[in-house]
Amino acid sequence: MARYLVTGGAGFIGSHLTGALRARGDSVRVVDDLSSGRLDNLAGFSEVEFIQGDLADADVARRAVHEIDYVLHLAAIPSVPRSVTDPVRSHRANVDGTLNILVAARDAGVKRLVFAGSSSVYGSEPGLPKRESMPTAPMSPYALQKLTGEIYCRLFHRLYGLETVVTRFFNVFGPRQDPGSPYSGVISLFVTALATGRRPLIHGEGGQTRDFTYVENVVDGVLRAVTAPKAAGEVFNVATGHRVSLLDLLGALAREMAASADPEFAPARAGDVRDSLADISKAGELLGYSPGVSFDEGLRRTIAWYLASQAGR
Ligand code: NAD
Ligand code: UD1
């Protein structure tokens, strides 16, 4: 039984990772400051140790990695617009927190750390699909902070021999994604708008595209990155290799929910990337990864979860 630390484990993706680890019998500690995460997200899993704390505090990071084999580092303020409004606060969580956990993991002799990177590091440079070898061009403080985290991870591998792997997530969706703020993931916002009879808001003209990835696929990619023999020091896209425009996404949701897709339009967001699509062949070759849950199936499961949680309220 391996001992895992999931940072940001009370959040959306972190709670799914925690659930998958507990389901196979691994021991899990979560560290989270509950800034966007919720303890409710962990309610379904037994025997999860929880530390509430801010990883920008080095003592919290040190306590969190004590006697841990593997670190899955997801804690972050994961929002492009939030980082545009308050870059300093995002930097503390996304860069200071990452450096602290890397130092603590190095000092505690952690076997491997997997970092939640982001497709946003590619920016709007021409060329799709995005391969890991392509240049990065951050367009927001968030993207720059995620890239800084990646570079720190690679540096810690080279300089100190700490095994680190970067998994670059593309727009992730699924149950437990919090729809509670205008900065939330677009699928959580569209589903809850349609479910409550509100008009979804589209920033821009809706032609922007994303490689929307169901959360179970991301969990699979991250868990493979923990054990794959040739992964240390590497960066991997974890996505589906397909892209969907916002207008097509809304059409698919409206059909599935038997609702009318009648969006309002607002100006495009500052720092927004136009098109995003991953080449996932490197993760296929070195991690044995392929997305097991299709976009349509992921949407169905996500809609079902939001409807059930609304009915339960
Ligand atoms: P989330 O907000 O649900 O999870 C982030 C968690 O980190 C929250 O529980 C939050 O309370 C915690 N946290 C934030 N700052 C912290 C700090 N200083 N100390 C301790 N805990 C802290 O978001 P998510 O969508 O689950 O994102 C998880 C990770 O995946 C993030 O690193 C994010 O950048 C990355 N990512 C997400 C997506 C996506 O589409 N959701 C895409 C690319 C990358
Ligand atoms: C970006 C990153 C992703 C990152 C995430 C964190 C890219 C390609 N992706 O996602 O890797 O982890 O930030 O926040 O950079 N939108 C609407 N209406 C809404 C909400 C959003 O039209 O109500 C639009 C946005 O302007 C954007 C798209 O939908 O064009 C997706 O937005 P969102 O779900 O917030 O994620 P990204 O910003 O793409």
Image (spheres, grey):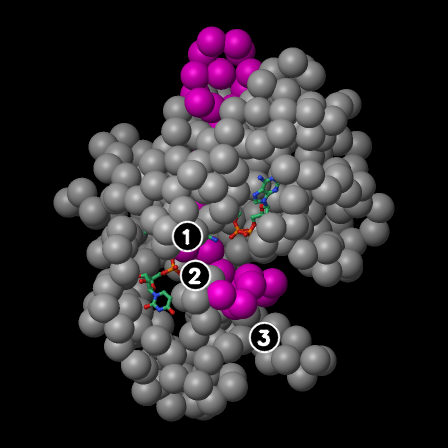
- The residue mark sitting in front, 3 or 2, is 2
Q: Residue drawn at (24%, 37%), measured in percent from left and top?
A: 137
Tell me which numbered mark, 2 or 1, is placed earlier along the sequence: 1
- Location of the C terminus by quadrant is bottom right
Residue depth check, mark 1 versus mark 3: number of the one nearer the observer? 1
Secondary structure type for disc 1:
helix
Q: How many marks?
A: 3
Q: Which mark is residue 183?
A: 2
Find out if the beta carbon at label 2 lies less than 8 Å from the nearest ligand 2 atom.
yes
Residue type, mark 2 in image: Tyr
Against 204, residue 137 (above or below) is above
Q: Nearer the viewer, residue 190 or 1?
A: 190
> In this view of the protein, which residue sits in the foreground, 128 or 105?
105
- Measuring 32% from the left and 58% from the top, which residue is drawn there? 210
Residue holding disc 3 = 306
Is residue 190 something one can see in this rendering?
Answer: yes
Residue that mark 1 sits on: 82
At label 1, the amino acid type is Arg
- The residues tagged by marks 1 and 3 sit, at their Cα atoms, a distance apart of 24 Å
Q: Earlier in the sequence, mark 3 or mark 2?
A: 2
**Rendering coords of residue 121 (x, y %):** 32, 40
Judging from the image, what secondary structure is the residue with disc 2 in?
A: loop
What's the distance in space between the residues labelled 2 and 1, CA to CA? Answer: 7 Å
- Give the residues drawn in magenta, as a range: 152-181
Whether label 1 lies within 8 Å of ligand 2 gets the answer: yes
The local crowd at label 2, few if under 14, some if 14 to 19, many if 20 or more residues have their Cα within 10 Å, is some
Asked if residue 226 can be seen in this view, the reply is no
Instruction: Give the mark nearest the N terminus, 1 or 3.
Output: 1
Question: Which quadrant does ligand 2 occupy?
Answer: bottom left
Would you say the residues marked 2 and 1 are in contact, meaning their CB atoms lie under 8 Å apart?
Answer: yes
In the image, taking residue 163 as reference, residue 49 lies left or right, namely: right
- Dividing the picture into quadrants, the one containing residue 61 is top right
